[in-house]
């Protein structure tokens, strides 16, 4: 279903009161919107910037069970994620790849250790298994990836997991929720909660596009703001204590020729306890990630110089690569909404999720990851059903096919001949409002090649201005703001 913002905004203003209002348009919020609409509830979703603008477009692009969590004894968490991995493969047909991952091994004890873990991974998947883990000999590994000879491998374990385009899947969730009756609006911010007798009954909103403020009524309001959820909680209760401990991870993007063969690479543990991935994606290779605790939540988190150095150093040491700073095409950072724990090491904090309610009735959803977005939404609706004031029967969305018929749109940067038509279509049917919306999420150009994104930004701004009836000053402002944004996707001294 087309996402036409003026139409959606009119429905939002005039269509209330709502059963459920969800604040946050990432994987969690969009999943809840789909689940609520499928249950027949009048559902509205508000996103302050753009769908998946935050964490949900900055992942490692994996649909996975979390093989490394087995070492932490989180067997149930892994089994649940493996079931959801398989469901997502079915529900987003053609948009989740069954992909091979190689774990290079240098010692016999490691061969045994990882072999046991990966076979348990297969066992936990049960009927949802995607093929068997297999041992790949040293000769075959080096034949596929000659650079691994430098680190002295004796072979590698090869297992299966999923790979996807996160922002594209988010848009598919939005379209599916809209088809089921939900109203979704981006670039609209929650300013304050409306309360009666101490209970939240609505939200005051500001349309970032026009500057207008207006209020909507809703029986239930859900906080699905990911790393920013604590900030929204303080709108409800100024004394709220943070429940999340965000951690930042970065990915460096290189041309595809840095990694030969058809498999991704995984190092289960680096110096900081994080895994190291090299994942082919949309014609490039993503290398990451780091785990840096952060105190400040930013809409556009920035990669630190020490993080870039860390990833380059570890990729070269652990994977035998020869990556150079000047080879980086883009670098992006994302925040993980980790649930607060006692441990100082954020790499060991929980990736599971929790749902609870504040004293005023604000439903809060925390934690989780892309793979389990549907289970998080299901748990949220079950929580709402038990709590009241709504009376409904939660739907079974485990086999809900997502509206993902976007063809090649969003998969690669558009060529010059089709750029204008691509921008206009995104503006008319995918709620694309800004240059950033188009070049970062409707297409992934900014994430794949920041300089290429800069080159086409003026033309994108011109087309969007025509579609949205904006003037030359707006067009110039868009180019300027996008240029400033793109600078953070390139290492220092690149521009």
Image (cartoon, rainbow, N blue to C red):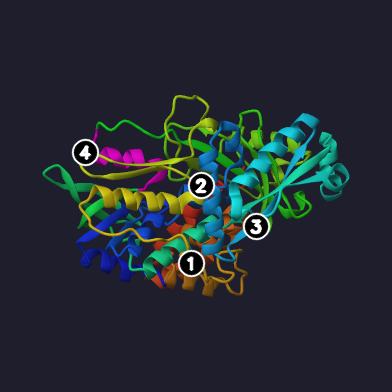
Camera-nearest residue between 432 and 269:
269
- Callout 3: helix, strand or loop? strand
Q: How far apart are the alpha carbons under marks 3 and 4?
A: 44 Å
The numbered dot on residue 80 is 2
Q: Residue at x 49, y 46 (%)?
A: 369
- Tell me where residue 89 appears, x and y as whole percent: 56, 60
Earlier residue among tags 2 and 3: 2
Q: Residue at x 27, y 56 (%)?
A: 20
Q: How far apart are the alpha carbons under marks 1 and 3?
A: 18 Å
- Tell me where residue 153 appears, x and y as whole percent: 82, 37
Depicted 94 relative to depicted 150: above or below: below
Camera-nearest residue between 420 and 66:
66
Q: Is residue 194 left or right of residue 61?
A: left
Depicted 291 relative to depicted 424: above or below: above
- Callout 4: helix, strand or loop? loop
Earlier residue among tags 2 and 4: 2
Is 231 contained in the magenta span? yes
Q: Is residue 214 left or right of residue 442?
A: left
Q: How far apart are the alpha carbons under marks 1 and 2?
A: 20 Å
Find disc 3 in the rendering and name its residue: 98
**Other residues around mark 3 within 10 Å, as few (<14) / some (14–19) / many (≥20):** some
Is 226 contained in the magenta span? yes
- Callout 1: helix, strand or loop? loop
The numbered dot on residue 401 is 1
Find disc 4 in the rendering and name its residue: 359
- Mark 3 touches mark 4? (CB < 8 Å): no
Camera-nearest residue between 89 and 123:
123
Earlier residue among tags 4 and 1: 4
């Amino acid at each position: 279903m087309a996402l036409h913002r003026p139409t959606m905004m009119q429905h939002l203003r005039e269509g209330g009161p709502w059963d459920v209002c969800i604040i946050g348009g990432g994987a969690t919020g969009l999943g809840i919107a789909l689940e609520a609409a499928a249950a027949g509830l009048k559902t509205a979703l508000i996103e302050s910037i753009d769908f998946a603008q935050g964490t949900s477009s900055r992942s490692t692009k994996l649909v996975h069970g979390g093989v490394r969590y087995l070492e932490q004894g989180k067997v149930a968490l892994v089994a649940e994620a493996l079931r959801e991995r398989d469901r997502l493969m079915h529900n987003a047909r053609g948009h989740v790849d069954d992909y091979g991952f190689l774990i290079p091994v240098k010692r016999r004890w490691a061969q045994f250790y990882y072999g046991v873990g990966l076979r348990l991974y297969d066992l936990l998947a049960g009927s949802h298994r995607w093929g068997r883990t297999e041992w790949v000999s040293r000769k075959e590994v080096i034949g596929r990836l000659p650079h691994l000879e430098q680190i002295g491998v004796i072979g590698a374990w090869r297992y299966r997991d999923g790979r996807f385009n996160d922002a594209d899947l988010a848009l598919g969730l939005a379209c599916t929720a809209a088809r089921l009756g939900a109203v979704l609006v981006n670039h609209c911010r929650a300013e304050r909660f409306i309360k009666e007798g101490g209970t939240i009954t609505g939200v005051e909103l500001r349309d970032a596009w026009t500057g207008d403020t207006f209020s909507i009524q809703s029986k239930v309001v859900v906080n699905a703001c990911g790393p920013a959820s604590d900030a929204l909680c303080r709108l409800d209760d100024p004394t709220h204590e943070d429940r999340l401990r965000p951690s930042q991870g970065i990915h460096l993007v290189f041309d595809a020729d840095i990694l030969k063969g058809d498999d991704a690479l995984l190092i289960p543990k680096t110096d900081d306890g994080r895994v190291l991935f090299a994942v082919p994606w949309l014609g490039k290779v993503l290398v990451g990630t780091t785990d840096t605790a952060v105190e400040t939540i930013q809409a556009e988190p920035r990669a630190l110089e020490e993080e870039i150095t860390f990833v380059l150093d570890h990729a070269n040491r652990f994977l035998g690569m020869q990556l150079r700073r000047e080879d980086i095409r883009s670098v992006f950072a994302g925040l993980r909404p980790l649930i607060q724990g006692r441990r100082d090491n954020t790499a060991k904090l929980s990736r599971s999720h929790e749902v609870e309610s504040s004293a005023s009735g604000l439903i809060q959803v925390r934690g989780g990851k892309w793979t389990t977005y549907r289970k998080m939404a299901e748990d949220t609706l079950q929580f709402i059903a038990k709590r009241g004031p709504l009376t409904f029967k939660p739907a079974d969305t485990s086999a809900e096919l997502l509206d993902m018929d976007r063809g090649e749109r969003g998969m690669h940067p558009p060529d010059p001949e089709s750029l204008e038509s691509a921008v206009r279509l995104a503006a008319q049917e995918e709620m694309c409002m800004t240059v950033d919306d188009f070049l970062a999420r409707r297409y992934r150009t900014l994430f794949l090649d920041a300089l290429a994104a800069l080159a086409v930004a003026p033309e994108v701004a011109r087309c969007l201005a025509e579609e949205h009836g904006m003037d030359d000053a707006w067009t110039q402002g868009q180019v300027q703001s996008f240029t400033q944004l793109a600078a953070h996707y390139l290492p220092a001294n690149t521009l």
